[in-house]
């Protein structure tokens, strides 16, 4: 059973639904493995738990909003 795992900041349920659908569609198109064999996990991390270039996502987003 193929597994797709995505680590991301919190997103809405609508976004999760669309992400799962599109990831599955692309994986099926590439691998020819049927969609019912795929499992998709979305791991959400709050903005204080994601870092880039020594800064948290919260800091980056706050600076970009200025």
Image (spheres, rainbow, N blue to C red):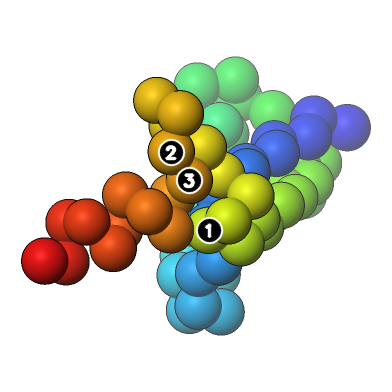
x, y (%) of residue 66? 11, 66
**Callout 3 touching callout 1 (CB < 8 Å):** yes
The correct choice, above or below, for 19 with respect to 32 in the image is below
Q: CA distance from mark 3 to mark 1?
A: 7 Å
Residue 24 seen from this side: no
Figure quadrant of the N terminus: top right
User: In front here: 42 or 57?
Assistant: 57
Residue 4 visible? The answer is yes
User: In this figure, which residue is indicated by the disc labeled 3?
Assistant: 56
The x and y percentages for residue 50 are 56, 44
Residue at screen point 58% across, 56% down: 48
Question: Callout 3: 10 Å neighbours few (<14), some, many (20+)?
Answer: some
Residue at mark 3 to residue at mark 2: CA–CA distance:
4 Å
Of the residues tagged 3 and 1, which is closer to the observer?
3
**Disc ID at residue 55:** 2
Q: Residue at x 30, y 58 (%)?
A: 61
């Amino acid at each position: 059973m193929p597994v797709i795992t995505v680590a991301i900041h919190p997103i809405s349920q609508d976004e999760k639904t669309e992400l799962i659908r599109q990831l599955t569609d692309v994986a099926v198109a590439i691998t020819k493995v049927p969609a019912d064999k795929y499992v998709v996990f979305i791991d959400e991390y709050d903005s204080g738990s994601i870092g880039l270039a020594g800064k948290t996502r919260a800091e980056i987003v706050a600076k970009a909003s200025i």
